[in-house]
Amino acid sequence: MLKLLFADIKMMLRNRQALFWMLMFPLMFTFIFGFFFGKNTTAGTIAVINQSQTELAQKVETSIKDSGLFVISDEKNVETAKSLIKKNKLSNVVVIPESFGIFAPDSAKKIVVYFDPGNSQANATLTGFIDQILTGINFSVQKATPIYTVSQENVGSSNALSYFDFVLAGILGLALMNSSIMGIAIGMTKYRQDQILKRITTTPVKTWWFIFGEVASRLMLNIVQISIILIIGKYVFDAHIYGNLFIIYIMAMLGAILFQLIGFSIASFAKTTEAAEGMATAITIPMMFLGGVFFPIDSLPKWLYSAVQFLPLAPLLRIMRSVILEGNSPFVNPINITLLLSWIVICALISIFRFRLTEE
Amino acid sequence: MKKVIEIKNLVKKYGTLTAVAGISFDVRKGEIFGLLGENGAGKTTTLEMIEGLRKPTSGNITILGTDISTGITDKVKRQIGVQLQASAYYQFLNLKEILELFGGFYNIEIDAMKLLSSVGLENKAKSLIKALSGGQKQRFSIVASLVNDPEIVFLDEPTTGLDPLARRRLWELIANIKSQGKTVILTTHYMEEAEVLCDRIAIMEKGKILTMGDTHKLIEKTKNPYRISFYSTKIGTKTEATLSKLGNLVNLLGKSNHFEMKFATQTNLNKALLIIQKATPESLIVGRASLEDLFIELTGKAMGEKNA
């Protein structure tokens, strides 16, 4: 029955809608978030105009330039630079005044930062950074050592992580969810509507073989799908993957099976492909945001969080992040894996009792 | 003649609605058997019960000696070929791939090209279904029901919605299936089609069989087997009255000079012909009754008319 499997794969590769949900949609997010938060990303483009010749001014200038936080423009004229902010070509202009760093009572003591109110992120990063440099300088000038400091300790893991790493795991879940729910819900409803499923029941092929072909071919393409996302994430945007790849794939397959079962459940109730698409969208879009693809759902209001933490996508993403970002075992938090398996059982029961190949 | 299908007291109920109300008939080996009737008469339900797609409420179905009343067996599935009404096929596989996949469903190797050329679709082997015309789709749908070289072929309204030429081409194809020794059961609501193709027919209405038998014998059994159709501008009310005594005279719908007459005996036909010839008709056709006349006689209405 490999014929059926190959035919299923062939059909999916020729189906533009399926390919969109399978590859284009998640890759779109990977690239968007990669460009914003992946490697080589900076807070903005700034101009550093140093009008002072002092050693101190040089030190501040090179610190900013070498920080790697900003793209540095070589604009040297203050007025032109300020006009470039208005044209959105620059986010900030740092001006180090002429007498900065000369130890005299009337010398300039302030570094001026011109900013674009539309880019508060760049401004916060820049002022914070300059503040830090100046604090260091102040201490050394006063020959003092700081007494109270902040010590940051990550309780999750000692791994270096970025927001992109967080989102990439989310995008994996998103990709699995969209392609599986949309694919099965719409595909199965269309098969039934077109009477293909009815036609097949007149042949000796077993129903479970037919279902197996659909499920297995999709899982095989899911492997390709998440591989592409992981490869692009890692090699194009420097994502960090600390977990065991085998476990990552096993968990992804569990997720894919769950979402396919949700697809079958939808196809059990939907009479037309339009209805199936509507129901699938109504489930996937809210879950995309409330399941925690793009931001941690524990920052939601408590009443909302206490509900959405149980959505099918939520425990899957918690497991994926724990495995990928911290290299944990999926069983480190048994509640998550229990939730995931419970959803699989629930949706399997709905599918078994409600899903029919034909109208009767 | 050997019976390949035997139906006894077949009933199908959906809640309070009775779709098939206790029908019995046999289908003989090598014939084309037609189930006729309006939409909703119960033709498709009957066919789908025989195909194993619907479970009968009561009654018996035996196919090639196997009783399938309680469920169809794989053995029978291999002996029958099914074409569903308005069925679509995989939209992302080409014709050759679909046939090969269906061969796979029966676990047999098939020569897809040979099958396709048997219905004149060899040039479309690499096309997708959506690139086919209505007639080509139906021909493909029929050839798809032949992949397992079945003994019995079920065709549910194979020519509905086709233009006259495509329909005739399909008739040839169906006759060709019969000539290979296969038995064909088809449903149709085209009387002309049944008259041309079917060896025997059963006319259904409201889940019951009104009449059944050899097609040509049934037509002869109509009350008025003779017919004249003529066009003349010189038929006055007096002539009309004379003619009406010989047979059933009607004006064709909306045409005042175009008449049609039906007669119970050939004597009356001859008498009427003499009268009509005096009126120098521009057109005069003498013919026999058709299956449609029988149907109208039996059901009291023309095909497609709504229940009054």
Image (cartoon, coloured by chain):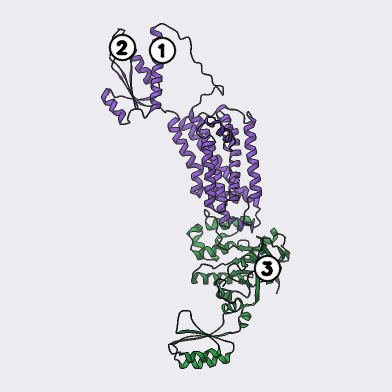
Seen from this angle, which residue lies furthest top?
A143
Chain B visual colour: green
Query: Which comes sooner in the sequence, label 1 or label 2?
Result: 2
Q: Which element carries disc 3, helix, strand or loop?
A: strand
Q: Quadrant of the C terminus of chain B?
A: bottom right
Relative depth, front residue between A302 and B72: A302
Q: CA distance from mark 3 to mark 1?
A: 96 Å
Disc on res. A136: 1
Residue A58, horizontal then vertical, whole percent: 33, 15
Residue on which disc 2 sits: A54
Tell me the amino acid under the disc marked 2: Thr
Q: Chain of mark 1?
A: A
Q: Which element carries disc 2, helix, strand or loop?
A: loop
Residue on which disc 3 sits: B21
Q: Which residue is at a point 36% across and 17% down the rendered structure image?
A: A62
Q: Nearer the viewer, mark 3 or mark 1?
A: 3
Q: Which residue is at a point 42% across and 28% down the rendered structure image?
A: A41
Tell me the amino acid under the disc marked 3: Ala
The letter of the purple chain is A
Residue A298, horizontal then vertical, whole percent: 54, 30
Can the viewer see residue A128 in this picture? Answer: yes
